[in-house]
Amino acid sequence: QVQLVESGGGLVQAGGSLRLSCAASGRTSGSDGMGWFRQTPGKEREFVAAISWGGTFIYYADSVKGRFTISRDNGKNTVYLQMSSLKREDTGVYYCATATSASTMAKTSPKIDYWGRGTQVTVSS
């Protein structure tokens, strides 16, 4: 079992920045990919970003490219999402996730091994 705990969400004005963190614990071996998804009421959960264990492979949703940066610290079993130039449409619950590979997370039908409970991000105008 792997436990994922997100932090760093909150309320921010449009154009502002936030950094999300996700700490993993438990049997993390085998979860090469770590990343982020988000969900707003009435919509399906959508992919945001993913990163491979060594950071060689990084994937972003088109909607966040150039504004969000994903990174990870394997010594701390933590993945980060630096969000800048935030827009109202970035509002949602952000979920941390793990998978066997980062590329798996970016697919149309991602195969996720574990989910965190989510952290709320609200962008006001």
Image: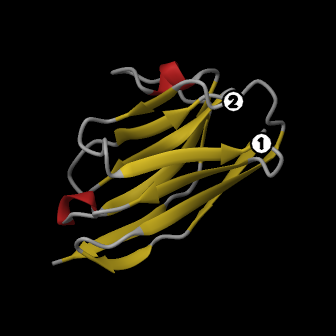
Q: Position of residue 97 (x, y in %)?
A: 57, 41
Q: Amino acid at mark 2?
A: Trp
For the residues bearing labels 2 and 1, Cβ distance under 8 angstroms:
yes
Q: Quadrant of residue 17?
A: bottom left
Q: Position of residue 122 (x, y in %)?
A: 31, 72
Q: Name the foreground residue: 37 vs 87.
A: 87
Q: Amino acid at mark 1?
A: Asn
Q: Secondary structure at mark 2?
A: loop
Q: Position of residue 58 (x, y in %)?
A: 50, 30
Q: Name the foreground residue: 12 vs 65.
A: 65
Spot the residue most to the left. Answer: 125
| Pointer 1 residue | 74
Q: Position of residue 2 (x, y in %)?
A: 75, 42
The image's mark for residue 53 is 2
Looking at the image, residue 82 lies above or below residue 109: below
Q: Name the foreground residue: 108 vs 61.
A: 61
- In the picture, measured across the screen, residue 86 lies left or right of residue 30, that is left
Quadrant where the image shows the C terminus: bottom left
Spatial CA distance of label 2 from label 1 is: 7 Å
Quadrant where the image shows the N terminus: top right
Q: Secondary structure at mark 1?
A: loop
Residue at left offset 27%, top offset 58%: 90
- In the picture, measured across the screen, residue 37 lies left or right of residue 33, that is left
Residue at left offset 44%, top offset 39%: 49
